[in-house]
Amino acid sequence: MENEIFDYIIIGAGPAGLSSAQYAARGGLKTLVLEGMGGGGQVTQIADLENYPGVYPAVNGYDFIEVMKNQALAFGAVIKNAQVSSIDKKGSDFVIKTNDTIFTSKALCIATGAVHKNLGVPGEKEFTGRGVSYCATCDGPFFRNKKIVVVGGGDSACSEAVYLSTISNDVSIIHRRDSFRAQKAVVDKMLAAGVKPVYDTVVKSINGTNKVESITIENVKTGQQTQLECNAVFIFAGMAPQTELVEMLKKDEGGYIITDQNMQTSIPGLFAAGDVRSKPFRQIVTAVNDGAIAANAAKELM
């Protein structure tokens, strides 16, 4: 099996990973980014990225990440599409195995991000791809002028509801609490777009025959259940960090990797950046910040 040696390897090609690659390569480190299928992270699902400082007017998330890739490549970083199967540490070196290559490095950064959680209700799995979706920009256009339900109460749910309101004038958002967790500006924009909030409510089942036709919802305060007709259910029920490759690391209660201010994990030379890391606020701008700090700390190890 082929063996390639780098100074610094980053697993994940979202904003955190690409930012780290740019800073590391520009700083003189031989840098590799390993991206799995569908590289780019959650940012590729954003139709209009409007809150990244210095980027105005809004840009498409896919275009934004492509610019980041090209910028990292221009500074000398290498980006490869490969699925990592294992990570080990031998002496002071990290050993990363993929299907056909073994990579080694003095420093390693985990920037694998997080994925959307499932609701775990009857009908969710059965109707995925037939009315159930986790990406509004991917599937929203299929439901133009249809009855759309969004489930969730954070920034992602509210932002995606705004986008869906441009496709249909019948969009409802279901949230288990009596107020949204999203930033006030995002919530205000959503409500101004005509999205109808349904508070104190959870989804109990997703119903239909060959496709979604309705959902059963329950008021958490009264216990009353009702049927809500709809053609699509977009689920944004929180995130689960992608930490399968580094189960040995210290994590918080939510499963996110704990680091110090330099993005250093509990293992020397192993860093974590972006949405996979334990922190109070997850945005593209904070992911980019994490990546840059990790690269700077990695350079100091050389």
Image (spheres, rainbow, N blue to C red):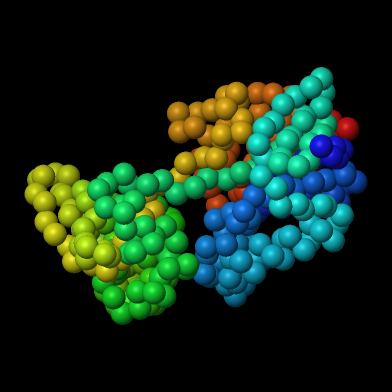
Residue sitting nearer the eye, 126 or 46? 126
Judged left or right of residue 196, residue 166 is right
Residue most toward the bottom?
145
The answer to which image quadrant residue 246 occupies is: top right
At a point 60% along the width and 23% down the height, the residue shown is 248
Instruction: Please tell me whether residue 75 is drawn above or below residue 250 in the rendered image.
Output: below
At a point 82% along the width and 20% down the height, the residue shown is 91
Percent x, y of residue 75: 86, 57
Instruction: Please tell me whether residue 262 is drawn above or below residue 224 in the rendered image.
Output: above
The answer, for residue 298, to whether it is visible in the render is no
Q: Quadrant of the C terminus?
A: top right
Residue sitting nearer the eye, 123 or 181? 123
| Marker count (numbered) | 0
Percent x, y of residue 259: 63, 31
The answer, for residue 252, to whether it is visible in the render is yes
At a point 31% along the width and 61% down the height, the residue shown is 233
Residue most toward the top?
91
Residue most toward the right?
28
Percent x, y of residue 272: 65, 37
Q: Quadrant of the N terminus?
A: top right
Percent x, y of residue 207: 21, 58
The answer to which image quadrant residue 90 occupies is: top right
Judged left or right of residue 38, residue 149 is left
Judged left or right of residue 5, residue 233 is left
Residue sitting nearer the eye, 259 or 209? 209
At a point 9% along the width and 49% down the height, the residue shown is 224
